[in-house]
Amino acid sequence: MNGAPEHHDAAPPARKNAGLAKMVVVAIGAFALTFALVPLYRIACEKVFGIRLERTAAPGSESGAGAGVQAAEKRVITVQFDGGVNSKLPWDFTPNQVTMQVVPGELYETTYHARNTSQRTVVGSAVPSVAPARASGYFSKTECFCFTAQTLKAGEVRDMPVRFIVDPNLPADVKTITLSYTFFKNDTLTAQAQGAAPAAPAPMSAP
């Protein structure tokens, strides 16, 4: 019998399109799930297990928490300052700052105050010392009035700077370092200075 021809090729393309659409949906869902797992994993670690995961900072920047941790890890040393003069030297000599908190490896500066209380020019030389003695090898002065003799004219006042660095390799049990100076009269240079410069006139007394 010759009937109308049957068409069997319409259904397969429809099923193929439906299968392809399902695959696309599954792929999109898997992609979204991958990104969702990251915060879920972080929340699970931090909230459930108590594990904190550090977030990566952008290049060239530090998060506030990361900077705080680094600051907390820095070691701090107390440096004390002391000063005095030999009995032959007519000066007043004291540190302007008695104590300072320093971080090893960084450069710091302090000053000492000196005043010639005599009526003549006087030259003094400072001798430094560091205590405890085993810390002396870890205390470096990059600038110091002790490197050269100091000349003060009659009544002259001067602030003398000291720049120093504490070596990061300082023994861990050393928490405090004392930098002390004693000024001595340099007789040779004082004689030369007084020979070149006349003494200051003595104050006149009332008749």
Image (spheres, rainbow, N blue to C red):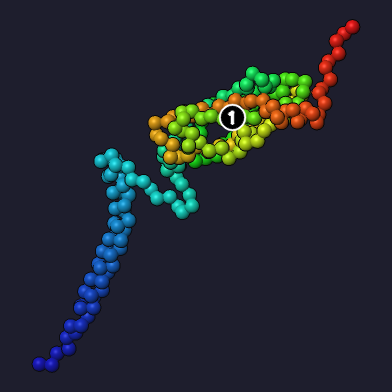
Q: Nearer the viewer, residue 85 or 64?
A: 85
Which percent across, then down, holds residue 91?
A: 68, 22
Q: Residue furthest left?
A: 1
- Quarter holding the C terminus? top right
Q: Secondary structure at mark 1?
A: strand
The picture quadrant where one finds residue 12 is bottom left
The picture quadrant where one finds residue 147 is top right
Question: Mark 1 belongs to which amino acid?
Answer: Val
Which percent across, then down, holds residue 135?
A: 46, 33
Which percent across, then down, holds residue 29?
A: 28, 60
Q: Residue at x 23, y 78 (%)?
A: 13
Tell me the residue that label 1 is attached to: 127
Tell me if 45 is positioned left or right of 108 in this view: left
Q: Residue at x 29, y 53 (%)?
A: 37
- Against 175, residue 60 (above or below) is below
- Is residue 44 at all visible to an observer of this figure? yes
Tell me if 18 is positioned left or right of 192 in this view: left
For label 1, count other residues whose C-alpha is less than 10 Å away and answer few (under 14), some (14-19) or many (20+): some
